[in-house]
Image (cartoon, helix red, strand yellow):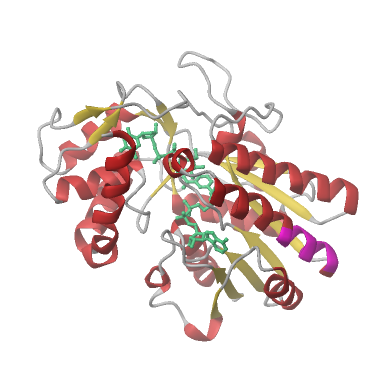
Amino acid sequence: SPPVSDLLVTGGAGFIGSNFVRHVLGATDDHVTVLDKLTYAGNRASLDGLPEDRLTFVQGDICDADLVDGLVGRADRVIHFAAESHNDNSLRDPWPFLQTNLIGTYTLLEAVRRHEKRYHHISTDEVYGDLELDDPERFTESTPYNPSSPYSSTKAGSDLLVRAWVRSFGVQATISNCSNNYGPYQHVEKFIPRQITNVIADVRPRLYGAGQNVRDWIHADDHSAAVLLISERGRIGETYLIGADGEKNNLEVVQTILELMGRPRDAYDHVTDRAGHDLRYAIDSTRLRTELGWAPRFSDFTAGLADTIAWYVDNQAWWRPQKAETEAKYAVLNQ
Ligand code: NAD
Ligand code: DAU
């Protein structure tokens, strides 16, 4: 059996980071150290029930160079999820995005450079900008960067820092850019959980603009499996796109949620569109599939969505404390 590694996972109390920690502890014998600041988006309860002898939790900031240096020095590998992740927040106040996504990534890169540790960088398909609805091409690893929002531009900047640290300093890094994730433990500010929890609370879902914007949905479990594979076996210096051929427009998603929750398909409201709203994202994940043999396990979006709805119905204690505060932020922005 392979030797047991110690993985430093930043942002491990967030939506995808906590999913990844559960995945690693289930699929390997590795030990995980989570570094998470527990911002409004982090929740220690997302890691409840995991084996305590294989998980160490450190509350702290990825911009804290001394803390990061010590943790990286003790780890075998670093997997970097921590970020400010929500586009709407970045339109309201971009500063935390520059601080965490750029300075935080820089701080980690300097530590992995000093300690010569393998590093995997989690990023997003939004760095490529958006596509027309009828564009036959999808994003590939060679699509030029063209980000639209403060969020995606700081993620693009962080990816470019990683590429430069590989080329200039020989840092052992890989990058992945994934499409829109869904599943349990996603913050109620994001589209799918916002609408599910609205319906549970008897509030009508809110569709930005006409609802024609397309996102390429992937279950977070499939993202986690891909990240583990790339962090172990990906080629150093390479970028891998992660996507599961799940393109849907927002109107279809809202209608499916309403139907699965026993409401009329038209029981939603149109609200003011997001400024600069990207029209369509679509991922071609051929490299990941052919080079590393990855394939998604969730191919039925409606079934995955039904499971996700059931999780939000069953786990109201996890999300209820955030709901009112989240909706108050939206009330200022676009209602
Ligand atoms: P999230 O907002 O749910 O979680 C982010 C986590 O990072 C939280 O636990 C938060 O406390 C922590 N954090 C934030 N700032 C920090 C700091 N300065 N120091 C330490 N911890 C800090 O985000 P998510 O949706 O799970 O996204 C995780 C990563 O995946 C991000 O890098 C994001 O850009 C990327 N990504 C997300 C998606 C998606 O659909 N959600 C898709 C592709 C890529
Ligand atoms: O593509 C990957 C990205 O997906 C990640 O990098 C981001 O971290 C993640 O937040 C997500 O970004 P989006 O902006 O696509 O996700 P969001 O859930 O905010 O919105 C999804 C779509 O739904 C988008 O077209 C905006 C729309 N929307 C969103 C909300 C919150 C609505 O129509 N109504 C809403 O209330």
Q: Is residue 288 magenta?
A: no
Location of residue 210 in the rendering, given as x and y in whole percent from the top left corner: 30, 21
Residue at 83% over, 49% down? 166
275, 200: nearer the viewer: 275
Q: Quadrant of residue 112?
A: bottom right
Residue at 28% over, 28% down? 252
Determine if residue 291 is in view: no
> Which residue of the protein is positioned furthest toward the top in this rendering?
134
Location of residue 317 in the rendering, given as x and y in whole percent from the top left corner: 23, 67
Q: Quadrant of residue 46?
A: bottom left
Left or right of 146 in this view: 252? left
Determine if residue 292 is in view: yes
Give the position of the N terminus as an image quadrant: bottom right
Up-down relation of residue 161 to residue 252 (above or below):
below
Left or right of 251 in this view: 99? right
Location of residue 61 in the rendering, given as x and y in whole percent from the top left corner: 59, 67
